[in-house]
Image: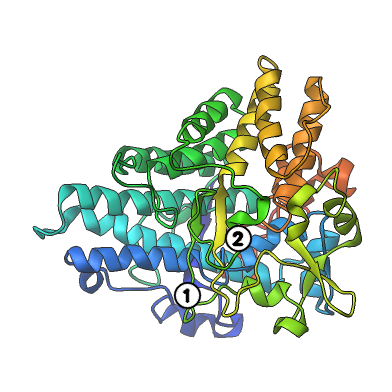
Amino acid sequence: MNVKIFLIGAFAGIVSLASCKKFLALQPVDYVSDQVTIVDASSAQTAVRGIYRALANDNYYGSLFQSFGYLSGDNIQWTGSQSIIQQFITHTLAADNGNLSSVWAGIYATINQANHVISKVPNVNDPLLTPALKNQLTGEAYFIRALAYFDLARTWGGVPLALTPTLASGDKNKLLRSSLDQTYAQVLSDLNAADSLLPLPSAATAPNPVRASRETVWALKARYYLYRQNWALAENYASQVVADTKNYSLLTPYSSFFNPASAVATRESVFELAYSSTYVNAHRGYWQPPANGGTRQWAPNDAFIALVNNPLIGGNRSALVAKTSAGLWYGNLYYRSPATDPAYVIRIAEVYLIRAEARAQQNTDLSGALGDLNAVRTRAGLAGSPATTQAEILLAIENERRIEFALEPHRWYDLVRTGRAAAVLGLTDPNKVVFPIPVSEVNLGKGNLPQNQGYN
C-alpha cells in the first residue's frame, strides 16, 4: 500500500524533533541551488564528481553502510561497549539507532545529488558539453541512483522514491512511499537508462573502475537479477562482464587487489571508490588496532579466524587478517596510512560467483557453475570443490562468498536473499530481515511513514 511521507532522509534528520517547526522553515541540509551549480560543462562534471563523493561518504560506502552487511552476519565481533553497534550483531536493532538514521540520510543525500544531474545536465547549452559527454555524465548519475535505491531496498524494503531535486523544504511533503517491488522497479529503470547512455570501453581505452561504464551497469544488473531470482538474466549479464578478459580478471594471489598499497583500480575491480590523503576512507580506523593508529572497534570473530586460516578453506585469503604482537586479530583489508584504501563496491570475483549461483539455480549447467566457483577457489590457492549436486554446489557458493567477501558488505544480505538467515544466524523472526525505519523519519512523517512491521 502506498502511503504519504512528510519528510524523507534527504533532509538529513540532524535537527531534534522539538525544533521541527523551525526546521521546516529552513532549507534541507542537502539543498543546492540547481541554477548556480550546473550551468556549463565544467560545473556539470563537478556535480557528477560530487555524487561520487557522496557515495564514498562515511555514512555510505565510506564505512557505515558497508558495516550493515558484515556486522549483521556471522564473521565479525564488536570489541567496544556502544550498544548501537552490538544491535546489528545480535539482530536487536532499535529504530533510534543512530547509524540507521545516518546511513538513511547519507543515501538520500546521494540520490538528491544524482537527481540534480539527471534533471539539469541534459538541458545545459554549452559547446564543450557535447552530446556524448552529456550522456556519460547523466548515465553515471542514473547508475549511482540505481545503486542507492538498490541498497535502500535490500536494507529497508519499499522506500519513498525521490526522483527530482530537493529545491525547497516542502517539495517532498506529498511523496508516496513505494512498495518493495516498485522500489526495485525504479532500480531497474535507472539501470536501463544508464545502460543506454554510458559508453563501452573502447579498444584504445580501458574502463576506469572509479567511474561507471556500461559494463559497470551490467555487473550491477547481474547482482540485481540475482536478488530478484531471475537466474537467466543474472547469468546473462554476469557473462557479459566476465567475457571482457582484457579489462577484468581474478588477480593472483587473492591479496593482489588490495596489497601492496599501490594496488588501486586493478583489473579485479569493476567498481570501486577512490580516496586521498585529504579525503580518507574511514574504514581503516574501525579495523586497524591501536598499535597501528586505529580503534579496532570491530574485528574478525573466532569462527571466522578459524575458517580463513584453514588452508583448505581460506587458502591465501588469510591475508585478510593479521595479529598484533599482543595476540589481537584484526581485519587487514583497510590498512594504508593515510587511509587512501579504495572502497570495493563490485569485484570481478563477485561476478563469477553470481554466474555460478545463477547457473546452479537453473540446474542446467552445473559444470559451468562449478567452473566459475573453482575459478575463485583456484585464485585463493584451493583445490576444486568436491560438490556435485545442485544443493551441494549452492552451499559451496554460499560458503565461498562468506570467506571471499568477509570484510565487504555481502554476508548479511546474502543470507537474507537466499532465505538462509534463520538456519545460519538463528534469526527466527521474519520481520527482522529488514531494518527498522529510523525513528526520526517516522516521527517527521507524522503517521504517513509507518514503521516496518515488528519494530516500535
> Is residue 252 visible from the viewing direction of this image?
yes
Q: Which residue is mark 2?
A: 258
In this image, 400 relative to 352: left or right? right
Q: In the rendered structure, which amino acid carries the disc numbered 2?
A: Phe
**Which residue is found at the position 80% from the left and 78% from the top?**
82
Of the numbered discs 2 and 1, the one sitting upstream in the chain is 2
Q: CA distance from mark 2 to mark 1?
A: 15 Å
Number of marks in the rendered image: 2
**Which residue is found at the position 33% from the left and 62% from the top?**
48
**Which residue is found at the position 43% from the left and 56% from the top?**
162
Residue 298 picture quarter: bottom right
Q: Which residue is mark 1?
A: 276
Percent position (x, y) of residue 114?
37, 59
Percent position (x, y) of residue 96?
71, 71
Quadrant location of the C terminus? bottom right
Which secondary structure lies at badge 2? loop
Front in this rendered view, residue 295 or 192: 295
Q: In the rendered structure, which amino acid carries the disc numbered 1?
A: Ser
In this image, 341 relative to 196: left or right? right
- Can you say whether 22 is above or below 37 in the image? below
Quadrant location of the N terminus? top right
